[in-house]
Amino acid sequence: MIFYATALSSYSAKVRIVLCAKGVEFEECEPPEGYRSEVYRAIVPMGTLPAIQEGVWVLSESEAINEYLEEAYPKPAMLPAEKQLRGHVRFVCRFHDMYLEPLVRTLFAQVKPSHRQAEVVTAQRLEIERRLGQLLLWARPQPYLLTPELSLADCGLLVTLPLAQEILAATGQQLTVPTALRNWHAAASAHPAVVQALAPWALATRAWLSQSARA
Ligand SMILES: N[C@@H](CCC(=O)N[C@@H](CS)C(=O)NCC(=O)O)C(=O)O
Protein backbone atom coordinates (compact mmCIF):
# COMPACT_ATOMS: atom_id res chain seq x y z
CA MET A 1 0.00 0.00 0.00
CA ILE A 2 1.26 3.49 -0.87
CA PHE A 3 0.33 6.14 1.69
CA TYR A 4 0.51 9.68 0.26
CA ALA A 5 1.26 12.01 3.13
CA THR A 6 3.56 14.70 4.42
CA ALA A 7 5.00 14.91 7.91
CA LEU A 8 3.23 18.22 8.58
CA SER A 9 -0.22 17.15 7.39
CA SER A 10 -2.70 16.75 10.26
CA TYR A 11 -5.11 14.52 8.36
CA SER A 12 -2.22 12.31 7.24
CA ALA A 13 -1.19 11.96 10.90
CA LYS A 14 -4.77 10.97 11.77
CA VAL A 15 -4.64 8.11 9.20
CA ARG A 16 -1.04 7.17 10.11
CA ILE A 17 -2.29 6.37 13.64
CA VAL A 18 -4.70 3.78 12.22
CA LEU A 19 -2.07 2.31 9.87
CA CYS A 20 0.34 1.92 12.81
CA ALA A 21 -2.31 0.64 15.25
CA LYS A 22 -3.34 -2.08 12.79
CA GLY A 23 0.23 -2.94 11.79
CA VAL A 24 -0.46 -2.33 8.09
CA GLU A 25 2.59 -2.51 5.82
CA PHE A 26 2.78 0.72 3.87
CA GLU A 27 5.20 2.87 1.95
CA GLU A 28 4.83 6.55 2.83
CA CYS A 29 5.39 8.89 -0.15
CA GLU A 30 5.22 12.65 -0.49
CA PRO A 31 2.81 13.66 -3.29
CA PRO A 32 4.85 13.92 -6.51
CA GLU A 33 5.38 17.64 -7.29
CA GLY A 34 3.33 18.52 -4.19
CA TYR A 35 -0.37 18.23 -3.43
CA ARG A 36 -2.66 20.05 -5.86
CA SER A 37 -0.03 19.48 -8.61
CA GLU A 38 -1.25 18.09 -11.91
CA VAL A 39 0.98 15.05 -11.49
CA TYR A 40 -0.51 14.27 -8.08
CA ARG A 41 -4.05 14.98 -9.31
CA ALA A 42 -3.52 12.43 -12.07
CA ILE A 43 -3.20 9.87 -9.27
CA VAL A 44 -5.48 11.41 -6.61
CA PRO A 45 -8.14 13.53 -8.35
CA MET A 46 -8.97 15.57 -5.22
CA GLY A 47 -5.32 16.64 -4.89
CA THR A 48 -5.55 16.36 -1.10
CA LEU A 49 -3.57 14.50 1.53
CA PRO A 50 -3.82 11.83 2.75
CA ALA A 51 -4.56 9.18 0.13
CA ILE A 52 -3.82 5.48 -0.22
CA GLN A 53 -3.14 3.43 -3.33
CA GLU A 54 -3.22 -0.33 -3.87
CA GLY A 55 -2.40 -1.17 -7.49
CA VAL A 56 -4.60 1.14 -9.57
CA TRP A 57 -7.11 1.60 -6.75
CA VAL A 58 -6.95 4.97 -4.98
CA LEU A 59 -8.84 6.38 -1.99
CA SER A 60 -8.67 9.86 -0.48
CA GLU A 61 -10.49 11.58 2.44
CA SER A 62 -9.12 10.57 5.83
CA GLU A 63 -12.41 9.31 7.23
CA ALA A 64 -13.15 7.14 4.18
CA ILE A 65 -9.60 5.76 4.42
CA ASN A 66 -9.92 4.98 8.13
CA GLU A 67 -13.26 3.22 7.59
CA TYR A 68 -11.71 1.23 4.72
CA LEU A 69 -8.75 0.24 6.92
CA GLU A 70 -11.17 -0.86 9.64
CA GLU A 71 -12.89 -3.21 7.19
CA ALA A 72 -9.73 -4.41 5.43
CA TYR A 73 -7.74 -4.92 8.65
CA PRO A 74 -10.35 -5.72 11.33
CA LYS A 75 -7.82 -6.43 14.11
CA PRO A 76 -7.48 -4.65 16.42
CA ALA A 77 -11.03 -3.32 16.05
CA MET A 78 -11.18 0.47 16.10
CA LEU A 79 -14.99 0.63 15.92
CA PRO A 80 -16.90 -0.82 18.88
CA ALA A 81 -19.27 -3.76 18.34
CA GLU A 82 -22.25 -2.07 19.99
CA LYS A 83 -24.27 -0.17 17.36
CA GLN A 84 -25.17 2.94 19.35
CA LEU A 85 -21.61 3.40 20.62
CA ARG A 86 -20.33 2.88 17.05
CA GLY A 87 -22.72 5.65 16.01
CA HIS A 88 -21.18 7.96 18.61
CA VAL A 89 -17.63 7.09 17.51
CA ARG A 90 -18.59 8.08 13.95
CA PHE A 91 -20.26 11.23 15.26
CA VAL A 92 -17.06 12.26 17.10
CA CYS A 93 -15.01 11.62 13.93
CA ARG A 94 -17.28 13.97 11.97
CA PHE A 95 -17.39 16.49 14.82
CA HIS A 96 -13.59 16.62 14.66
CA ASP A 97 -13.42 16.94 10.85
CA MET A 98 -16.30 19.38 10.39
CA TYR A 99 -16.29 21.60 13.48
CA LEU A 100 -13.07 21.39 15.48
CA GLU A 101 -10.18 20.96 13.02
CA PRO A 102 -11.35 23.70 10.61
CA LEU A 103 -11.45 26.07 13.58
CA VAL A 104 -7.90 25.21 14.62
CA ARG A 105 -6.81 25.62 10.99
CA THR A 106 -7.94 29.27 11.04
CA LEU A 107 -5.14 29.87 13.58
CA PHE A 108 -2.47 29.06 10.96
CA ALA A 109 -2.74 32.62 9.65
CA GLN A 110 -2.03 33.97 13.15
CA VAL A 111 1.31 32.25 13.72
CA LYS A 112 3.54 34.86 12.06
CA PRO A 113 3.87 37.78 14.49
CA SER A 114 3.70 40.26 11.59
CA HIS A 115 0.26 38.93 10.55
CA ARG A 116 -1.15 38.35 14.03
CA GLN A 117 -4.28 40.01 15.43
CA ALA A 118 -4.51 39.28 19.16
CA GLU A 119 -8.30 39.79 19.26
CA VAL A 120 -8.77 37.25 16.46
CA VAL A 121 -6.59 34.71 18.31
CA THR A 122 -8.62 35.25 21.51
CA ALA A 123 -11.93 34.83 19.69
CA GLN A 124 -10.73 31.62 18.00
CA ARG A 125 -9.36 30.27 21.28
CA LEU A 126 -12.70 30.83 23.03
CA GLU A 127 -14.52 29.11 20.19
CA ILE A 128 -12.15 26.12 20.36
CA GLU A 129 -12.72 25.93 24.12
CA ARG A 130 -16.50 25.99 23.52
CA ARG A 131 -16.18 23.14 21.02
CA LEU A 132 -14.05 21.07 23.44
CA GLY A 133 -16.78 21.51 26.07
CA GLN A 134 -19.36 20.38 23.50
CA LEU A 135 -17.24 17.32 22.65
CA LEU A 136 -17.32 16.28 26.30
CA LEU A 137 -21.10 15.91 26.09
CA TRP A 138 -20.40 12.74 24.05
CA ALA A 139 -16.91 11.70 25.05
CA ARG A 140 -16.52 9.58 28.17
CA PRO A 141 -12.77 8.96 28.45
CA GLN A 142 -12.18 5.39 29.67
CA PRO A 143 -9.25 6.00 29.05
CA TYR A 144 -9.80 6.44 25.28
CA LEU A 145 -12.35 8.98 24.18
CA LEU A 146 -15.37 6.66 24.06
CA THR A 147 -13.97 3.18 24.52
CA PRO A 148 -11.56 1.09 26.64
CA GLU A 149 -9.32 0.56 23.55
CA LEU A 150 -8.03 3.04 20.97
CA SER A 151 -10.84 3.80 18.48
CA LEU A 152 -11.25 5.86 15.30
CA ALA A 153 -12.71 8.63 17.50
CA ASP A 154 -9.33 9.25 19.15
CA CYS A 155 -7.27 9.70 16.00
CA GLY A 156 -8.20 13.20 14.81
CA LEU A 157 -8.23 14.78 18.26
CA LEU A 158 -4.83 13.25 19.09
CA VAL A 159 -3.43 15.55 16.40
CA THR A 160 -5.72 18.56 16.63
CA LEU A 161 -5.66 19.11 20.41
CA PRO A 162 -1.84 19.38 20.74
CA LEU A 163 -1.77 21.38 17.50
CA ALA A 164 -4.21 23.93 18.94
CA GLN A 165 -2.21 24.06 22.19
CA GLU A 166 1.10 24.57 20.40
CA ILE A 167 -0.16 27.18 17.94
CA LEU A 168 -1.82 29.13 20.74
CA ALA A 169 1.32 28.89 22.89
CA ALA A 170 3.31 30.29 19.93
CA THR A 171 0.91 33.25 19.86
CA GLY A 172 1.28 33.81 23.61
CA GLN A 173 -2.10 32.34 24.62
CA GLN A 174 -2.95 29.21 26.58
CA LEU A 175 -5.79 26.86 25.65
CA THR A 176 -7.92 25.84 28.63
CA VAL A 177 -8.46 22.09 28.28
CA PRO A 178 -11.02 20.33 30.51
CA THR A 179 -9.40 17.89 32.99
CA ALA A 180 -11.12 14.87 31.41
CA LEU A 181 -9.56 15.72 28.05
CA ARG A 182 -6.15 16.38 29.60
CA ASN A 183 -6.25 12.94 31.24
CA TRP A 184 -7.44 11.36 27.98
CA HIS A 185 -4.57 12.98 26.08
CA ALA A 186 -1.94 11.84 28.60
CA ALA A 187 -3.18 8.22 28.33
CA ALA A 188 -3.91 8.08 24.58
CA SER A 189 -0.72 9.80 23.43
CA ALA A 190 1.32 7.11 25.23
CA HIS A 191 -0.20 4.30 23.09
CA PRO A 192 2.78 2.79 21.15
CA ALA A 193 1.07 3.21 17.75
CA VAL A 194 0.28 6.83 18.53
CA VAL A 195 3.88 7.50 19.62
CA GLN A 196 5.15 5.94 16.37
CA ALA A 197 2.60 7.64 14.10
CA LEU A 198 2.90 11.13 15.56
CA ALA A 199 6.70 11.32 15.86
CA PRO A 200 7.23 12.74 12.32
CA TRP A 201 4.25 15.05 12.67
CA ALA A 202 5.43 16.47 16.03
CA LEU A 203 8.92 17.18 14.66
CA ALA A 204 7.60 18.87 11.52
CA THR A 205 5.04 20.90 13.47
CA ARG A 206 7.63 22.20 15.94
CA ALA A 207 10.01 23.11 13.10
CA TRP A 208 7.21 24.97 11.26
CA LEU A 209 6.14 26.83 14.39
CA SER A 210 9.62 27.91 15.41
CA GLN A 211 10.42 29.05 11.87
CA SER A 212 7.11 30.93 11.45
CA ALA A 213 7.25 32.51 14.90
CA ARG A 214 10.52 34.19 13.87
CA ALA A 215 9.14 35.55 10.58
N1 LIG B 1 -11.40 16.35 4.31
C1 LIG B 1 -10.03 16.01 3.95
C2 LIG B 1 -9.13 17.15 4.40
C3 LIG B 1 -7.71 16.87 4.05
C4 LIG B 1 -6.88 18.13 4.00
O1 LIG B 1 -7.36 19.26 4.13
N2 LIG B 1 -5.62 17.91 3.77
C5 LIG B 1 -4.71 19.00 3.57
C6 LIG B 1 -3.37 18.63 4.14
S1 LIG B 1 -3.51 18.37 5.90
C7 LIG B 1 -4.63 19.20 2.08
O2 LIG B 1 -4.52 18.24 1.35
N3 LIG B 1 -4.75 20.44 1.62
C8 LIG B 1 -4.68 20.73 0.21
C9 LIG B 1 -6.00 21.13 -0.38
O3 LIG B 1 -6.98 21.25 0.38
O4 LIG B 1 -6.09 21.32 -1.59
C10 LIG B 1 -9.63 14.70 4.61
O5 LIG B 1 -10.21 14.36 5.65
O6 LIG B 1 -8.77 14.00 4.08
Image (spheres, rainbow, N blue to C red):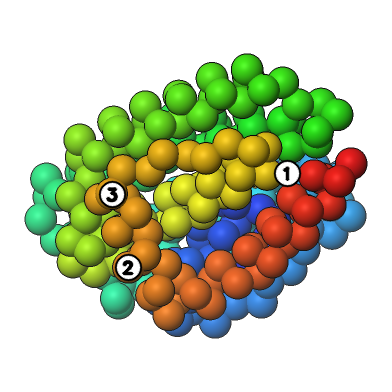
* 10 Å crowding of disc 1: few (<14), some (14-19), many (20+): some
Q: Quadrant of the N terminus?
A: bottom right
What is the C-alpha distance between the residues marked 3 and 1?
38 Å
Q: Quadrant of residue 136?
A: top left
Nearer to me, 31 or 59: 31
For badge 2, the amino acid type reads Ala
Q: Secondary structure at mark 1?
A: loop
Instruction: In the rendered view, tell whether residue 24 sits above or below residue 162.
Output: below
Whether pointer 3 and pointer 1 mark residues with C-beta atoms closer than 8 Å, the reply is: no
Residue at the spot of label 3: 179
Residue at the spot 18% in from the left edge and 50% down from the top edge: 140
Whether pointer 2 and pointer 3 mark residues with C-beta atoms closer than 8 Å, the reply is: no
Nearer to me, 120 or 98: 120
For badge 1, the amino acid type reads Gly
Residue 187 marker: 2
Mark toward the viewer: 2 or 3: 3
Nearer to me, 171 or 96: 171
Q: Quadrant of residue 171?
A: top right
* 10 Å crowding of disc 3: few (<14), some (14-19), many (20+): few
Residue at the spot of label 1: 47
Q: Quadrant of the C terminus?
A: top right
Residue at the spot 66% in from the left edge and 69% down from the top edge: 200
Picture quadrant of ligand 1: top right
Q: Secondary structure at mark 2?
A: helix
